[in-house]
Amino acid sequence: MQTTPAVPRQAVAPSPPDTPETPTPQARPGGRFGLPTATALVMGNIIGGGIFMIPAAVAPYGTVSLLAFAVLTVGAIALALVFGQLARRNPRTGGPYVYAREAFGDFAGFLSAWSYWITAWVGNAALAVAAVGYLDVLVPIQHSTWLTIVAALVIQWLPALANLAGARSMGIVQLVSTVLKFIPLAIVAIGGLGFFKPANLGPFDATGHGWVGGMTAAAAILLFSYLGVESAAMGAGQVRDPERNVGRASVLGTAGAAVVYLLGTLAVFGTVAHDKLVHSTAPFSDAVDAMFGGSWGGTAIAVAALVSMTGALNGWTLLAAQAPYAAAKDGLFPARFAGERRGVPVFGVLVSAALASLLTVLNFVSGAASAFNVLVLLTTFTATVPYLLSTAAQLYWLVRGEQGRVSRGRLVRDAVLGLGAFGFSLWLVAGAGYAAVYQGVLFLFAGILIYVWMAGRRA
């Protein structure tokens, strides 16, 4: 497994002419997250609840979807390596926001922070709603709307409280939840290979429209499985030795998630008959039942899904506060977002959790599931905006070729990685679909009013 080699911190070159001169704060020497915790943050945020439905979602395209997974993994690791290189130059909390602002100025930085913040708290609402569905398997609660709301809010606020207890406590929860979610998934992924039956796989190209078209269609569903590769870069200020560990954690976490995804999907494909898998609503439960018999698979997977989603909520709650925190430090978000306690931006955590809670309540009270789904689809677009801006920043520094920012001996390698990561990010945008991109642009540009207000007050 390739990791990013450590290099000494380089001197920071002057900002471009249209960007205000801003000193680059140094990373805390005593960061609260070591390499294991930072890796768990990346892996835990990538692996949320989607893994439990992925095999059924891509089954209609055939086993060509496994090839799509492999291609996407290469793109995701390239993106992780780029984030590691960017963090080595500027190890500040805020990740994509910091890189976009340093390269292209305040407005690009604000768009990155605004877009990422939207992604995080809307996605947290989606995770809480999905977690309630799995909780209902264990404790029937969905017969009562208000009981469902209370359960969703509890699931949402427990990770928020873990964050408010401090970065160290949050890191412990993240590490434990990642291990707990990894064990059952690994059992299915590895143990399922012992029950593997090639006859269950079905056709390579189930659509009959050519394997290239099938792979592209499957990739459109799988693309968003890798959202979260930037997690270590976003919290770089909390990572010990970020110049070295952010890149390593990004690659290790992404590769670990990829192994779980790929082996898990392959195991389900080989244990559940293709014609059944296409219509399955709980593919991992069906796989467990096929492997061990009985009907306890649904309960076991429900517990694993709850642990997985709670761990993802724990990590994304912190990330939801980090982008506005970094922007507020530079005067691009309200100053309250810049306050922190025990390494955690308290106001950002509270506001993000409150907005996610409001959206959750509106979803259940109004019954507007379709409207909620539209907002969730928007996050697939808003998440890619910081990716595109970050990879563009990497290419910008390579083109400028400034001494101290670019390793001339690795220029070709870095350029290939940068272009690959940019292409991967652009593919994410294309996979979001026309409607999501159109609505996402409107949602994104609505934040311009906030930028106008903050920039006007600063001036």
Image (cartoon, rainbow, N blue to C red):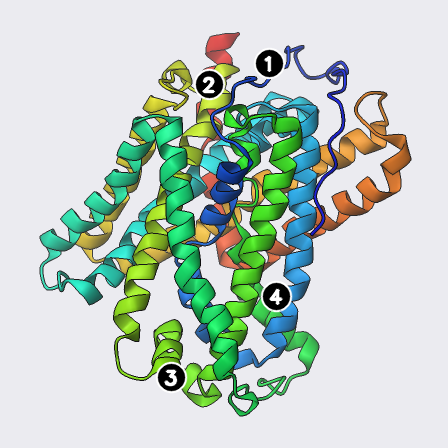
- Residue drawn at x 54%, y 74% as measured from the top left: 266
Q: Residue furthest top?
A: 459
Task: Return the x and y of residue 377 as percentages of the image width and height.
Answer: 44, 54
- Residue drawn at x 57%, y 17% as measured from the top left: 29
Residue 328 is marked as 2
Sequence-earlier tag: 2 or 3? 3
- Relative side of 328 to 144, left or right: right
Sequence-earlier tag: 1 or 2? 1
Task: Return the x and y of residue 203 as percentages of the image width and height.
Answer: 59, 88
Residue closest to the eye, 25 or 361: 25
Real-space Cα distance between discs 4 and 2? 38 Å
- Relative side of 302 to 208, left or right: left
Q: Residues within 10 Å of mark 2 (few under 14, many from 20)?
A: many
Residue 5 vertical position relative to residue 125 in the rendered view, above or below: above
Residue closest to the eye, 349 or 32: 32
- Relative side of 353 to 200, left or right: left
Sequence-earlier tag: 3 or 1? 1
